[in-house]
Image (tube, coloured by chain):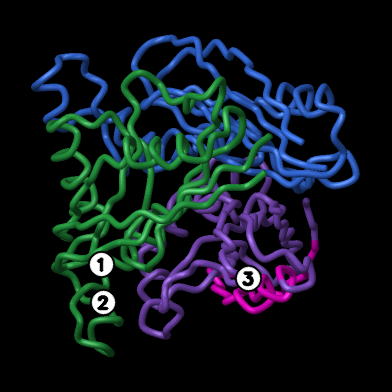
Chain colours: A purple, B green, C blue
Amino acid sequence: MLCTKRIEVATEGHCDIIDITSQVAEGVAASGLKEGTVMVFVAGSTAAVTTMEYEPGLLEDLKETWKRLVPEGIPYKHDLRWGDGNGYAHIRASLLGPFLGVPLVDGRMALGMWQQIVLVDFDNRPRSRAVVVQVVGD
Amino acid sequence: MLCTKRIEVATEGHCDIIDITSQVAEGVAASGLKEGTVMVFVAGSTAAVTTMEYEPGLLEDLKETWKRLVPEGIPYKHDLRWGDGNGYAHIRASLLGPFLGVPLVDGRMALGMWQQIVLVDFDNRPRSRAVVVQVVGD
Amino acid sequence: MLCTKRIEVATEGHCDIIDITSQVAEGVAASGLKEGTVMVFVAGSTAAVTTMEYEPGLLEDLKETWKRLVPEGIPYKHDLRWGDGNGYAHIRASLLGPFLGVPLVDGRMALGMWQQIVLVDFDNRPRSRAVVVQVVGD
């Protein structure tokens, strides 16, 4: 059995980190499945998905980390060629990745107590993001 | 067909890297499935899973890399708010990610010869980790 | 339903980044499935898969980023022990990861318009890589 649901997420860009756990959970509930794997994928090359404890301190820490590891203010060949100024966003998204899987056990996603599913939008402008939620199961 | 197995892994924390390949393989064998995808997920926001050649040199190299990229000794807003001192562990776990998939082909996981499945516990104390192993297949 | 296809990809190593989207799409087409999840896995501990906009500027930017984050010219314990000089390649591959999932919706992978599936070979010599493509679906 496979169920697919598409959700739209409005973001502010600029490393906006959005807790999408409840939207994913709604997609899972709509599937009627109780056992399976939940697959979360964001379309696009400047956004990514992962998990984290969604609290304000860590939101700032994660943004600081990306500024340090893949800075905005250094030259990117992508920007020289295309002029959109979001080379850093592309690189960050490739490193973090657009896909996440989470087990579905007894009708609940097997996340830790302080673990949420987040969409990270690295682009340099607000975007509307298509996130595909699939449940593969019995 | 879907089979789910939960395994518990005791860790020392502090970037403890544990080879869980044989425990995952036991879960796969117990499923009786020969073709499918093996899904590995660690619950919690300070641990992650990936693959690597599990040899002592690389274990040290990976620990050194994380110390360099996401150091312990710099200020994290998470630590200012909550005082648990493991902000770096949260950030590392979000970057590496809690999920891994491995193909199951002819009853064997299609890993490379020098490729093991590892659990990395970034937290700053020993932990018991719940790892969920699922096999989706025919 | 599950379909498995193995593809071989010749690489130059040295952070060679290869667009494998069309090869993955051929595997998906051969499965005959229209709805499901496409699972992509590279065997080996010095290669990885992710997505990116496949254009020459970003290829250079991604290579520069890896040189900066996990440099070749610093000492790795792996190299001291084994002498293959590819410690950096192992570390990069573990950080990026060997697995990717992409939803299959209405017979098409739900990638963004500028989002391709890439194999990144970090090793320090040309390699032939086994990539396993699986489709789990109805």
Label 3 element class: loop
Measure the alpha-carbon separation of dots 2 and 1: 7 Å
Task: Tell me the subunit letter for badge 1.
Answer: B
Disc 1, disc 3: CB below 8 Å? no
Query: Any magenta on residue B24?
Result: no
Measure the alpha-carbon separation of dots 1 and 3: 32 Å
Give the magenta range. Answer: A5-28
Q: What residue sits 63% from the left and 16% below the top?
A: C7
| Residue C75 visible to an observer of this rendering | no
Query: Any magenta on residue A10?
Result: yes
Q: Residues within 10 Å of mark 1 (few under 14, many from 20)?
A: many
**Horizontal and vertical percent position of residue C66:** 38, 38
Residue bearing the label numbered 1:
B88
**Horizontal and vertical percent position of residue C75:** 12, 31
Disc 2, disc 3: CB below 8 Å? no
Q: What residue sits 78% from the left and 47% below the top?
A: C110
With respect to residue B79, does B28 lie above or below?
Answer: above
Mark 1: amino acid: Tyr
Residue bearing the label numbered 3:
A107
With respect to residue A115, does A84 lie above or below?
Answer: above
Mark 3: amino acid: Gly
